[in-house]
Image: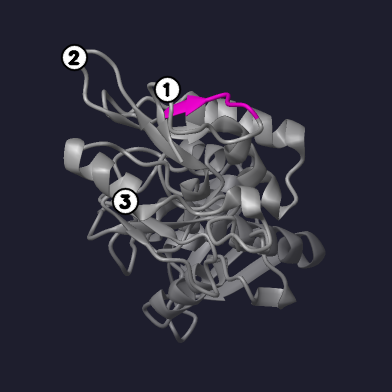
Amino acid sequence: MLGSVTARPPPFIFRGQFTYAPTLRPAGFATVPAGFTEFGPPTDDYPHGTVSYARPLRSEDVEHFDLEPLDPDDPMIWKRAFQTYRDEVYRTFSKTKGFEQPRFNGGRSTLTYSTRPNVKFQLTYWEADWTPTGHLDLQSFDEAADELWAAVPTEEIDRRLEAALWKRTRDGSTTARKGNPVSIDSTESPELASPEPELLAQLREENPEALLANGFEAAFVGICRRFGQPPLALYDRRKCLAILMADGTSEDDAEEYFEFNTIGAWMGENTPCFADLDGEKKGDSGDAETR
């Protein structure tokens, strides 16, 4: 079937890494799906950093964690580019009762209403000199759009995939929130001051496998200990919420996000602990070491 011929590998042939940009929260523990291969640092274009995976994420995970795909071969980018293309074809066809486009082999494709009974659309393939080479009878517009998309020239596919990628500066706006909750100036927010490095060093020495909650560095308050278990990182829940609200998030939204994505995440026996502490920092006494 001529309309099913493509000029490039289909998007389900996975090669290399697939990278995503968090649009609302820093890339880190409990803010992205598990299974990542590496993190990228924050940049001007991606203020919350990036996170990479060996395979593309499910669309449900991308939407749940508010991620944006950054690779043209990501299936979600192909889907987005196709939807834009389909809408353009539909608008043109609705106005002119026909649609024409170049094919990757130098020929043309035309879509018209069919004159045959019980057939709605006819997609015809032509050589460069307008010699017909075949046609398809189609029952729905979506079928027609699929067939047209399959014959789009490679250069046009690449252009549309590039246009479908998320860019922070496109149209003078961005889908990411301004500001970066990871980089909080402790001089402006004394209660969110960074933890003392020696306490983190002590945790690393006692339990090198202890997980840290990336993005909540300023809420780290000490080491949590349990009998017969490895020591864990301890975070102040109140300060975690303050970090989430630093970019303008409401208290209710911060609570909901924190409970579902942070408290609700289990990464094994080295998962950090989160405690409801008093407004004032604890002293040197007590079982939990805080400073």
Instruction: Give the number of the mark in front: 3 or 2.
Output: 3
| Magenta range | 273-278
Q: Quadrant of residue 205?
A: top left
Residue 159 falls within the magenta-colored stretch: no
Secondary element under disc 2, as helix, strand or loop, is loop
Crowding at mark 3 (Cα within 10 Å: few <14, some 14-19, many 20+): few
Within the image, what quadrant is residue 225 found in? top left
The residues bearing labels 1 and 2 have C-alpha atoms spaced at a distance of 19 Å
Whether residue 30 can be seen here: no
* Amino acid at circle 1: Gly
Q: Which mark identifies residue 198? A: 3
Give the labeled residue for mark 1.
286
At 52% from the left and 42% from the top, the residue drawn is: 219
Select label 1 or label 3 by which is in front: 1
**3D distance between C-alphas at marks 3 and 2:** 24 Å
Observer able to see residue 18: yes
Is residue 275 magenta-colored? yes
Secondary structure beneath dot 1 equals: loop
Q: Nearer the viewer, residue 231 or 171?
A: 231
Badge 3 element:
helix
Q: Residue at x 27, y 58 (%)?
A: 17
Asked where in the image residue 258 lies, by quadrant, the reply is top right
Q: Which residue is mark 2?
A: 228
